Image (tube, helix red, strand yellow):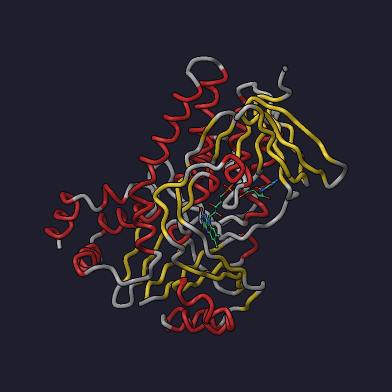
Amino acid sequence: MAKAFDAIVVGARCAGSPTAMLLAQKGYRILVVDRATFPSDTISTHILHPLGASALSKWGLLDRLAATGCPPIHTYAFDFGPFTIAGAPGTREAPVAYCPRRTILDKLLVDAAAQSGAEIREGFAVEEILVEKGRVVGIRGRSKFGGSITEHAQVVVGADGLRSFVAETVRAEHYDEKPRLLVAYYTYWSGLPMDGRFENYSRDKRGFAVAPTHEDLTMVIAGWPYSEFAENKKDIEGNYLKTIELAPAFSDRLRGARREARFAGAVVPNYFRKPYGPGWVLVGDAGYNRDFITGQGIMDAFHDAELCAAALDGAFSGRQPFEDAMGEYQRTRDTRVKAMYEFTCQLATLEPPPPEMQQLFVAVHGNKKAMDEFARMNAGTISPAEFFAPENVNAIKAAA
Ligand SMILES: Cc1cc2nc3c(=O)[nH]c(=O)nc-3n(C[C@H](O)[C@H](O)[C@H](O)COP(=O)(O)OP(=O)(O)OC[C@H]3O[C@@H](n4cnc5c(N)ncnc54)[C@H](O)[C@@H]3O)c2cc1C
């Protein structure tokens, strides 16, 4: 039977829309469905590190984002209490980060997919993944504006986030799982100018981060170990403010600001999933999730979209067997993120760094080149494997 679409993408946010856009640009027939309508928010803070901004730039979308009044961030500052390491997170080509509201970023991505020729159906909830003889062949779902609808495609792309229905249906294999580590809550403040800085505060079993976003608001997220989730959820505001009071200078700044939104919070699992099988693939959080403490998810979703769209193009065009193209996608994804995954999960314990790492951070402090490297490593511009390589560590210690 002729398939109506080359690919149906379930989920239209950071992973789904760019995947659809890149495939549609190559002339493939793409349907994107999402139960949400856009613009809409989702539970996520939204640091977009410089390499994420660089992907937007490559896709011709960074100017559109900048035109929405999203302030650029040129400095990341990590306050450990006794000292602060501050550096530039980007590269010459991609010098700055942003912290765009998801209402704005996700809408921009959905519109870009539509402009590239993908058909977008918002308010459409997928209720069934159609499987014939062990192969995914389409979806059945319900539109907010009508009844039950069935669509067929060569491939169904699960870009449907953490609780991916596509991954669950095909029983995608999980590997390298780690427990839930951190719980955090965030809200937005007015009257808290940041002057292009992202600030991160680490204290024993506590941490918080601050970044400027749209409409002159500043996002502040604060967290504690997951083991304290049940006890602390009885007083979210009190625990949030107590965490911030661990950094008195910042706490003073916050006292002059005004809270403009309710608290939102989350705890997330850490896992990899095999991202492909007969008639299906996974991108973004559906295929790989790491704690949000390092803010890698949006950038990772963009990387996945590029890798996955290129692999599907290879398979659709007959240049490569599907298994080979997708196997390469999985290997490239995993190799790129592995060191950051370990670093992120370690950080998300909120345990003090081991003594040798503390000595290294002391040595980094005050060394401009090393501080820029440290900021770049936290931004995912360079890999933790590169930053913590013995020759780099020895050079930093020798310079100190
Ligand atoms: C508290 C918190 C803070 C975070 N902070 C950052 C940060 O600062 N920087 C960063 O880069 N990342 C951050 N992340 C991670 C980031 O939010 C995710 O990595 C990113 O949203 C992944 O995008 P995605 O497109 O894969 O999934 P999602 O953004 O989750 O999108 C999935 C979409 O699929 C749709 N969907 C799901 N099921 C169905 C269905 N059955 N039918 C139709 N549609 C469906 C949903 O409606 C949704 O729109 C944070 C996450 C959390 C929880």
Is 3 rendered above or below residue 342?
A: above
Residue 189 left/right relative to 152: left
- Tell how many labels: 0
Q: Position of residue 56 (x, y in %)?
A: 54, 41
| Residue under the image location 62 percent in, 65 percent down | 216
Q: Is residue 285 left or right of residue 13?
A: left
In the displayed structure image, the side of residue 161 where residue 366 appears, left or right: left
Residue appearing at x 56%, y 60% in the figure: 45
User: Viewer-proximal residue, 282 or 204?
Assistant: 282
Residue at x-position 65% and y-position 23%: 28
Q: Residue furthest front?
A: 133
Instruction: Determine which quarter of the picture holds residue 130.
Output: top right
Does residue 161 appear anywhere in the picture? yes
Q: Nearer the viewer, residue 87 or 206?
A: 206
Res. 157 image quadrant: top right
Q: Quadrant of the C terminus?
A: bottom left
Q: Is residue 137 above or below residue 127?
A: above
